[in-house]
Image: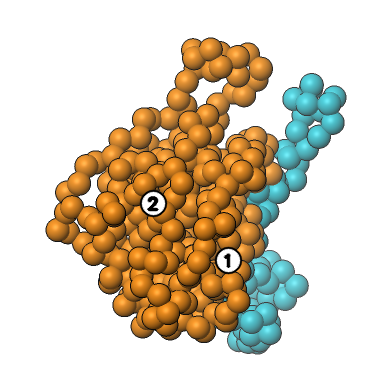
Chain colours: A cyan, B orange
Amino acid sequence: MGFLDALLGRSSTRRAPSSANVAKQRLVEVLVQDHVKITPEVMDAIRGDILKILSKHLDVDADQLQINLTRTERGDNFTANVPVRRGAGSRR
Amino acid sequence: MGEERQQSTLGRIVTVTSGKGGVGKTTTTANIGAALAALGRSVVLIDADIGLRNLDIVLGLENRIVYDLVDIVEGTCKLRQAMIRDKRLNSLYLIPAAQTREKDAVSPQQMRTLCEELRRQFDYTLIDSPAGIEQGFRNSIAGADDVVVVTNPEVSSVRDADRIVGLVESSELPTPKLIINRLDPALVRRGDMMSVDDVSEILAIPLLGVVPNDESIVTSTNRGEPAALDMESRAGQAFRNIAARINGADVPLMVLEEPDGAWHKFLRSIGLRGNRSAPVQGKGAS
């Protein structure tokens, strides 16, 4: 952050997440992997299987599928965020 | 000799460890030990980093070594012969690591036996663990009652600390306690260093203390004089607070977000802004 930015109260961290937040996020993700002992290959396999099952019934946007292992206070959590294309409905 | 404990209760064995090297384990061990001794407790420090002896030089005792940890467990010398009394504090002792031996020169069972002997003589036995998660680490926690994990607020040491927490928890020891070392409040404020809350949240173990990054650690280590004995040192104050907590006192965390301008330094120098933290008060023998 330059002097002028500081003077005008502009912060470069306002646009991008702060490096501390990036560090925290990366740590949370890697620790979940350390705990659950899931390799990126296994995550990819899970992603493929989810897509295979869901696309039997839904018009799924495969590129937008997000799967994550996250750490919560109650334990490690697997989440999948699967966008479905609008208006397509069931393929059956 | 004076180190014989007056109380009939047994002392506690506390291991200081970290996983990653270079986070300040040895400095932490030396300073907490010195601060506990300054509170009037009898303390022995064990350098369990066999082959990489360092606690002696941090304490300024490097010229007094005759026997070491391996000599004790092998019976080459008596326990008392290998214990070096500190120059400044007469209730503080050091058992140095062997410098020319391998880590497997000591077994976990030998460490347990040694700890049982030491807890009859000292209020506190602090063990400075080697970095890593192998034999040396396992030896260092074998006889411990409690484990303290030291980390810096950066990704690699926090990840390694997490690994250590898992290993300690799976070895039937109580949940370890956390010391966050080398925290830079200005970097945290700027969003360029993880905060105490960030690190505590990730590791999810009780916080024992936070030590600010402080030049006085460099100068005190240069001289072989623990910063905990320097009443001007902020890191020293943090270590004194940690020692008091270990000793049972309820000491609040230091306020690290103090303005540090020239004016405040001046005020502090003339005594108008002293002690940025609560006074350390030991709890007396129980």
Q: Report the chain holding disc 1.
A: B
* Image marks 2 and 1: residues in contact by CB distance under 8 Å: no
Q: Residue at x 72, y 73 (%)?
A: A61
Evaluate whether residue B184 shows in this view. Answer: no
Residue in the foreground of this view, choosing between B247 and B122: B122
Q: Residues within 10 Å of mark 2 (few under 14, many from 20)?
A: many
Q: Report the chain holding disc 2.
A: B
**Above or below: residue B265 compared with residue B88:** above
Q: Are marks 2 and 1 on the same chain?
A: yes
**Above or below: residue A62 compared with residue B56:** below
Q: Position of residue B105 (x, y in %)?
A: 50, 83
What kind of element bears circle 1? loop
Q: CA distance from mark 2 to mark 1?
A: 18 Å
Instruction: Tell me the residue that label 2 is attached to.
Output: B92
Sequence-wise, which precedes: disc 2 or disc 1?
1
Q: Residue at x 55, y 26 (%)?
A: B258
Mark 2: amino acid: Leu
Give the number of callouts.
2
**Above or below: residue B61 compared with residue A85:** above
What kind of element bears circle 2? strand
Instruction: Tell me the residue that label 1 is attached to.
Output: B53
Q: Residues within 10 Å of mark 1 (few under 14, many from 20)?
A: some
Q: Position of residue A35 (x, y in %)?
A: 52, 75
